[in-house]
Image (cartoon, rainbow, N blue to C red):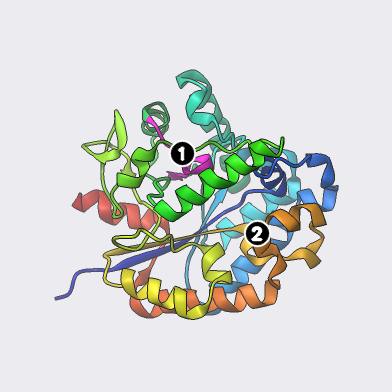
Amino acid sequence: MSAVRLASISVDLDSLPHYCRIHGLPESLLDAEARTLIHRVAVPRFRDLLASVGAPGTFFAIGEDLESDPGAADAMRQAHAAGIEVASHSHAHDYALTRRGPTAIAEDLARADAAILKATGVRPSGFRAPGYTLNADLYAATVAQGYRYGSSAFPAAPYYAAKAAVMGALAAMGRPSRSVLDTPRVLLAPRVPYRPDPARPYRRGTGAVVELPMTVTPLVRFPFIGTFAATLPRGTMRAAYRACRADAFFNFELHGVDVLDAADGIPPELVRQQRDLRVSAAKKQERLRSVFQWLKDDFDVVTLRDAAGHFTATL
């Protein structure tokens, strides 16, 4: 009997102000419509994509958005009712959350959980760190919150190098990014599910909260994420997919902007910086639907919560 092979599809619902912060742009560029674009437009598109292939999904919601935007809270309420898992992407999506100290970290996670509970009626089972940045303080807070899993480790060398280069260029231009460059130790993190060492969560240990890293290819650790799947040549992504197809778990991570484009009302200043927004939303959705179908054909596609239940019992 062959071993169970699982895949999960998850979407980080970062609203557009966070992209302004990444690119060193003023948030005043965004009108009220643009600020609500992710939950108002991207979430329904992702729900349609998932439904088109009969796959479940996990949405990582930011508590602050659910508190400030009734439409966002309603979108998560409807997603939960449709069987989509709603997990925590923190309260404020503070890129420097790991630097805030245990008390502030605990308060942030608790506020996010409260907002998600209010919107969906269910406490979140999982957590993904802002900017994928994890450390001992943040890991300890996930244990204290009682999460079943974390999904923050992103051991992608090309992504890390590109992020460092962009942050350096923005700083040189006098537009420093609010992003935080993680420790290079993340590049040595396991690329498969593992129990972290609580003191050094990018290493294996005996931690209570299982870590489900985002998928990267073996050896070069090229990231298989939504932005690339939607925009790079299909042959490139097909080759990357084949390299990961034998894995016991495929964790496909996306962002809300992966199904948006400039015509959705995004300021041109942000479109110039976020190049994937120049690709039509229709084309990106078609590409993502193909990848979702690949996963559906080759894996048992489950929510991250259900994947965590499987790996918690086996790790």
Residue at 63% x, 58% y: name it. Answer: 256
Residue at 38% x, 80% y: name it. Answer: 297
Q: Relative to the observer, which residue lies in front, 292 or 238?
A: 238
Residue at 58% x, 70% y: name it. Answer: 231
Residue 54 in view (yes/no): no
State which tag comes first along the sequence, 1 or 2.
1
* Residue 171 location (% of width, % of height): 64, 36
In the rendered structure, which amino acid carries the disc numbered 2?
A: Val
Classify residue 20 by image quadrant.
top right
SS label for mark 2: helix
Q: How many marks?
A: 2
Based on the picture, tell me whether residue 25 belongs to the magenta stretch.
Answer: no
The answer to whether 308 is drawn above or below residue 180 in the figure is below
Badge 1, how many Cα within 10 Å: few under 14, some, many 20+?
Answer: many
- On residue 257, the disc is 2
Provide the residue designation for mark 1.
133
* Residue 151 location (% of width, % of height): 41, 48
How far apart marks 1 and 2 lie (CA) works out to: 20 Å
Question: Which residue range is magenta in the image?
Answer: 126-135
Most extreme residue toward the front, as rendered?
172
The answer to whether 312 is drawn above or below residue 254 in the figure is above
In the rendered structure, which amino acid carries the disc numbered 1?
A: Thr
Based on the picture, tell me whether residue 129 belongs to the magenta stretch.
Answer: yes
* Residue 95 location (% of width, % of height): 56, 36
Quadrant (top left, top right, bottom left, bottom right) of the N terminus: bottom left
Residue at 26% x, 43% y: name it. Answer: 195
Q: Are marks 1 and 2 in contact (CB under 8 Å)?
A: no
Side of 305 where 227 appears, left or right: right
Side of 236 where 114 appears, left or right: right
